[in-house]
Image (cartoon, rainbow, N blue to C red):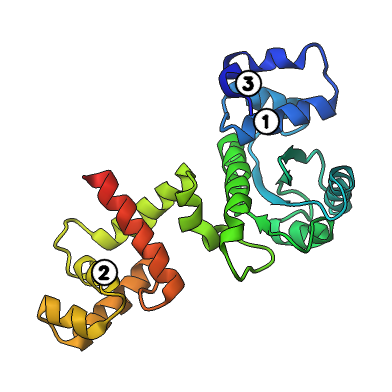
Amino acid sequence: MLGDEHADILELLAGRTDDGTIRALAFECLVSGLHDERVTSLLNVVGWRGAFECFAVGGEPAQNMADTVSRIETAIADLGGASPIIGVYGTFVIVCARVQAAVSAGVACTNMLSAFSEDAAVYVSPIREGIEGASHVVRETLFSLQAAPSLVEQTRPLRADDLLPERALIGDDMAREELYRNVYQVLHGANDDDPTFVTVSTFLRHGGSLETTAKELNIHPNTVRYRLKRAAETTGWDATDPRDAFVLNTAIALGRIRDR
């Protein structure tokens, strides 16, 4: 990570202007959360000019780092893409690629899946725009790979919503923001007394008991069911599902802390 050297980042090139060095430095910037005009200049040099859409894929190498990097580059080139930003962070290899020609998140991930270890998680990010989006996809991929061991059962590849609460727990501010804005605020409504919010939070607090929730709120169990269904429709998370309940609990905890 680049840490305090952000202000002088271009000086780190030290006269080396080959594409490999520039792309490696660009990766360090993106994974560090730096996405200003200096990083834009780095990407321009390797062909990432103008507006662009991008995504990231990451995992542990199937054989070794060099082989995985080579196979990723081949997979992107075979789809008509160019100049992927590839970096190594600990045991992970992460690629940030532009959407171009036949290169899309789903197709590219499928084509490079064999380059990653079958015994570890693989993550593919959503498509995002611009330099800030590039930093976002690289960082969310890193956090997702770090959080993946918490899941007993994993899809291959993992996707954006699969690890939201776990990413929040290990310090991912992007996941925390998403849980706050897209879950807590949507559920919470305008005030703490919103009936749906009160019902969901009470239901979760009582371990998913309809009867206990209804008794505490002095409403019929069918009213509880209706409000839980409405909450699932508005947030996308169902409080009656154990995994979704964990997401909702995490979002509510983060929201209460933030709004205190």
For label 3, the residue is 38
6 to 257, vertically: above or below: above
- Residue 236 visible? The answer is no
Q: Nearer the viewer, mark 1 or mark 3?
A: 1
Q: What numbered label is drawn on residue 28?
A: 1
**Residue pushed farthest left?**
218
Rounded to the nearest angstrom, the CA distance separating label 1 from label 3 is 13 Å
Badge 3 amino acid: Arg
Picture quadrant where residue 114 is located: bottom right
Badge 1 amino acid: Glu
Do residues under tags 1 and 3 come within 8 Å of each other at their CB atoms? no
Rounded to the nearest angstrom, the CA distance separating label 1 from label 2 is 42 Å
Give the SS element for disc 2.
Answer: helix
Picture quadrant where residue 47 is located: top right
In the visual, does 226 lie left or right of 236? left
Do residues under tags 2 and 3 come within 8 Å of each other at their CB atoms? no
Give the SS element for disc 3.
Answer: helix
In the visual, does 56 lie left or right of 250? right
Q: Tell me which residue sits at (39%, 74%) in the image.
A: 238
222 to 195, vertically: above or below: below
Badge 2 amino acid: Arg
Q: Tell me which residue sits at (87%, 47%) in the image.
A: 64
Give the SS element for disc 1.
Answer: helix
Q: Nearer the viewer, mark 1 or mark 2?
A: 2
For label 2, the residue is 205
Q: What numbered label is drawn on residue 211?
A: none
**Circle nearer the N terminus (2, 3):** 3
Q: Residue 248 at x, y = what percent?
A: 36, 64
Categorize mark 2 by other alpha carbons within 10 Å: few (<14), some (14-19), many (20+). few
